[in-house]
């Protein structure tokens, strides 16, 4: 089995920078992806291949990866960014794809 | 813009087989990979498996013995069967489209709204 580890919760005030981490042994060689899930909705891709932002995603969302840790950064978090965030990646074989346990971001 | 919609029974009895279908509209099902993901209430996401054609599927090892996926290209649909279900299989089930990015890595760019399946007698 393979696991990605995220903090259960992160809290910031509006306008502050929020950072959500994701650790996994295969991350030095595998991309990390980030999904935002608001209550009752399907997840939405916000970062792919460590640091690329899909069209339509605000510039305040950014991603980085170093060693066994990937980080999602929200620069100037807004109340509308309150959601659960999941990292997603694969193990060293590339056959098992897993999500992190999720991080609840509170902006208040 | 591709759209996905899950359909199937919302209630399944223990030990029976859960069957869901995902209908793809706004684009062809061909030339893409397609996945199923599930989420128990209040919990995280779990990738179930991925299929390109009925002969090319990759399943989560933890579910592999109970999962079968297939594609019906003519209907622009793909399906999930999960056998011998228990209460632990109660979850919202999502279908999603995979894109293949750099270095052959997969990620989901479009999701269905999800459908709740409850396992109970």
Image (cartoon, coloured by chain):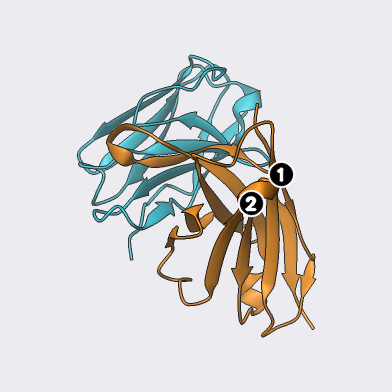
Chain colours: A cyan, B orange
Q: Quadrant of residue A22?
A: top left
The residue located at (54%, 16%) in the rendering is: A58
Residue B41 in view in this figure: no
In the image, B60 versus A77, the foreground residue is B60
Q: Earlier in the sequence, mark 1 or mark 2?
A: 2
Badge 1 element: loop
1 and 2 marks on the same chain: yes
- Where in the figure is residue B82, as x and y percent of width and height? 60, 72
Distance between the Cα atoms at labels 1 and 2? 7 Å
Quarter holding the C terminus of chain B is bottom right
Residue A48 pos. (x, y %): 41, 31
When the figure is inspected, residue B89 is found, relative to residue B101, above or below; the finding is: below
Disc 1 to disc 2: CB gap under 8 Å: yes
Chain letter of the residue beneath label 1 in the structure image: B
Q: Quadrant of residue A70 in the image? A: top left
Residue tagged 2: B94
Q: Position of residue A85 (x, y in %)?
A: 52, 40
Residue B56 showing in the rendered view: yes
Q: Chain ID for label 2? A: B
* Residue at 56% in and 24% down: A13
Q: Position of residue A40 (x, y in %)?
A: 72, 44
From the viewer's side, name the closer residue of A43 and B8: B8
Judged from this view, the residue extending furthest toward the front is: B74
Determine the residue positioned at 43% across, 71% down.
B62
Q: Assign the N terminus of chain B to one quadrant of the image.
A: top right
- Disc 1 marks which residue? B113
Does dot 2 land on a helix, a strand or a loop? strand
């Amino acid at each position: 089995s393979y696991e990605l580890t995220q903090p259960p919760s992160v809290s910031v005030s509006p306008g502050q920078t929020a950072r959500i981490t994701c650790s996994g042994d295969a991350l030095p060689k595998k991309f990390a992806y980030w999904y935002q899930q608001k209550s009752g909705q399907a997840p939405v891709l916000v970062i792919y291949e460590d640091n690329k932002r899909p069209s339509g995603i605000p510039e305040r969302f950014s991603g980085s990866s170093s060693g066994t840790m990937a980080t999602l950064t929200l620069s100037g978090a807004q109340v509308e960014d309150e959601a659960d965030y999941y990292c997603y990646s694969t193990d060293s074989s590339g056959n098992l794809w897993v999500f992190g346990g999720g991080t609840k971001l509170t902006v208040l | 813009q591709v759209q996905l919609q899950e359909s199937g029974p919302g209630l399944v009895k223990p030990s029976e087989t859960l069957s869901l279908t995902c209908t793809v509209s706004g684009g062809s099902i061909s030339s893409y990979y397609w996945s199923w993901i599930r989420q128990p209430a209040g919990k995280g996401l779990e990738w179930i498996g991925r299929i390109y054609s009925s002969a090319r599927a990759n399943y989560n090892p933890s579910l592999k013995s109970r999962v079968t996926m297939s594609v019906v290209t003519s209907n622009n649909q793909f399906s999930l069967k999960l056998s011998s279900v228990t209460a632990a299989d109660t979850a919202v089930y999502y279908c999603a489209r995979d894109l293949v990015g750099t270095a052959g890595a997969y990620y989901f760019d479009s999701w269905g709204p999800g459908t709740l399946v409850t396992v109970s007698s």
